[in-house]
């Protein structure tokens, strides 16, 4: 591809910004990003959040290696390093955890226990004192078992996306916001194959390009219906407690703390003193608004969490920081991810589009934010190679997302089974 050939990236979330950044870094000078939200990072991007876990333990060594690569970049890339905090990661199960939670924790530990990158970084959590050693401020009962990994932490995710957005602007990437893509444009080539040549927006603007990359996360099916059910929008609850400066100071430096069967929380945000809390579980789908047999897509209204999730967050606090367990939860919302059947990403050309004109980079499956420094590079490599050689990242025709995921406890709940009063936060 010529370096000045027009490239169109649709969606300015984690995948979209990283993709624009890597194409620009590779010398491409004619990149346009379309984003339906008026702001970047977009309001409904999963990465537009206070923080996300950065860790390299994975049941699958393939992703463990990628996460290690990404972590090296989080630490050394001056653009991102200010937003990465290596507070450590406490991964455990409460006394009441089901067998599945115990199994997934052992698999996580197994993936790093023998790895040279983690030598001297892991210590077992067998009793309460093992926790108070690494988090002295926790004063709950915590009959937990698991481990503490010093080589992990979190990133201030919205801030990191903003930094990447600024870097893209400085590299000459154009952003067009506040106008959703209505449809893609296809032309029939002489051999009657279908080539994607651009997109039309709701306001009627046409953008043409030689390469179009779809980085729409959970909303992919709204622009690419043929993705069908291989990607399902799946959401998790997020809530916060507003701490006073003194309270936040007391919690400064705590590790990311994740009880597999209850949920997780982070060091309070350094700017706002908000403590972010997430209940664990298998998440929520939204098949209810789509046609029969259609995909799960995010609903328009997301500013709520269910009473069951609120209860789980309070149980997590009673175990760790009981003094905060009855405090009001604020900024409650659902965070939408793009699940695939096997939790593998999709970085591939869309079949039956010629000239390698249309790439899908999606299927984060709830474990991709940590890859922000490198995820965009994979589309650059694909465009160069002309074929996805990494089989696990290919288009997943015929697969239905929504099955069992090893690290999640329980079954997903569809929003149709959540009372309307909860879903509309009445
Ligand atoms: O990659 C990570 O460390 C994400 S863990 C957080 C979480 O909420 C999961 O617990 C959940 O199962 C889903 O995958 C979204 O991310």
Image (cartoon, grey):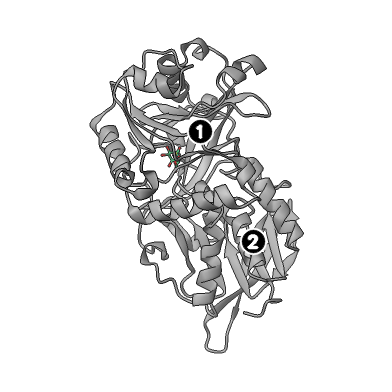
| Nearer the camera: disc 2 or disc 1 | 1
Say which of 356 and 373 sits in front: 373
| Identity of the residue drawn at 57% across and 74% down | 357
Kindly report the distance in space between the C-alpha atoms of the residues bearing marks 2 and 1.
30 Å
- The residue at the far bottom in this view is 190
Which callout, 2 or 1, points at the residue further toward the start of the chain? 2
Instruction: State if disc 1 and disc 2 touch (CB < 8 Å).
Output: no
Query: In the image shown, does 122 or 374 lie closer to the viewer?
Result: 122
Instruction: Identify the secondary structure beneath mark 2.
Output: helix
Is residue 297 or residue 63 the one in the foreground?
Answer: 63
Q: Which residue is mark 1?
A: 87
Q: Residue at x 51, y 64 (%)?
A: 378
Q: Which residue is mark 2?
A: 20
In this rendering, does residue 294 appear at all? no
**What is the x, y in percent for residue 129?**
35, 18
> How many numbered marks have been drawn onto this rendered protein structure?
2
Q: Nearer the viewer, residue 57 or 200?
A: 57
**Above or below 371: residue 205:** below
Mark 1 neighbour density, 10 Å: few (under 14) some (14–19) many (20 or more): many
Image disc number at residue 425: none
Give how far across and how far down residue 365 sits, in percent: 44, 48
Report the residue at 60% width, 57% height from top.
Answer: 18
Quadrant containing the C terminus is top right
Element at badge 1? loop
Residue 98 versus residue 299 in the image, above or below: above
Can you give x and y, in whole percent of width and height, for residue 229 in the image?
Answer: 42, 55
Image point 61% across, 68% down: which residue? 212
Q: Is mark 2 within 8 Å of ligand 1?
A: no
Left or right, 24 with respect to 383, comes to: right
Considering every residue shown, the one lying at the far left of the view is: 99
Q: Quadrant of residue 240?
A: top right
Q: Where does ligand 1 appear, by image quarter? A: top left
């Amino acid at each position: 591809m010529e370096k000045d050939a027009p490239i169109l990236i649709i969606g300015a979330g984690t995948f979209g910004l990283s993709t624009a950044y890597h194409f620009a870094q590779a010398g491409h000078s004619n990149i346009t990003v379309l984003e339906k939200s008026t702001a970047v990072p977009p309001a409904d991007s999963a990465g537009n959040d206070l923080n996300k876990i950065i860790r390299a333990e994975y049941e699958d060594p393939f992703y463990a290696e990628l996460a290690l690569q990404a972590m090296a970049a989080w630490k050394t890339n001056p653009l991102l390093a200010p937003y990465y905090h290596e507070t450590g990661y406490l991964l455990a199960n409460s006394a009441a955890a089901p067998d599945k939670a115990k199994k997934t924790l052992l698999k996580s530990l197994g993936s790093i226990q023998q790895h040279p990158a983690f030598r001297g970084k892991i210590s077992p959590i067998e009793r309460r004192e093992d926790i108070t050693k690494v988090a002295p401020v926790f004063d709950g009962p915590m009959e937990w078992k698991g481990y503490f990994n010093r080589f992990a932490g979190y990133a201030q995710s919205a801030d990191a996306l903003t930094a990447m957005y600024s870097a893209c602007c400085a590299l000459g990437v154009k952003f067009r916001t506040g106008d959703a893509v209505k449809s893609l444009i296809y032309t029939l080539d002489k051999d009657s194959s279908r080539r994607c040549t651009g997109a039309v927006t709701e306001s009627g603007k046409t953008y043409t390009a030689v390469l179009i990359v779809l980085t729409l996360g959970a909303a992919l099916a709204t622009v690419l219906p043929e993705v069908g059910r291989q990607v399902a929008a799946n959401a998790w609850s997020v809530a916060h407690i507003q701490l006073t400066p003194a309270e936040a100071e007391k919690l400064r430096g705590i590790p990311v703390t994740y009880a597999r069967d209850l949920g997780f929380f982070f060091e309070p945000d350094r700017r706002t003193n908000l403590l972010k809390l997430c209940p664990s579980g298998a998440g929520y789908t939204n098949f209810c608004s789509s046609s029969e047999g259609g995909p799960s897509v995010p609903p328009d209204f997301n500013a709520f969490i269910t009473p069951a999730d609120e209860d789980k967050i309070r149980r997590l606090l009673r175990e760790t920081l009981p003094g905060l367990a009855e405090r009001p939860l604020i900024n409650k919302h659902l965070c939408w991810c793009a699940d695939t059947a096997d939790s593998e990403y999709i970085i591939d050309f869309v079949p039956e589009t010629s000239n390698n004109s249309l790439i899908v980079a999606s299927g984060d499956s709830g474990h991709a934010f940590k890859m922000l420094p490198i995820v965009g590079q994979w589309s650059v490599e694909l465009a160069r190679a002309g074929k996805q050689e990494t089989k696990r990242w290919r288009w997943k025709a015929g697969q239905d997302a929504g099955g069992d995921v090893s690290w999640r406890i329980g079954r997903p709940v569809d929003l149709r089974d959540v009372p309307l009063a909860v879903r509309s936060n009445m």
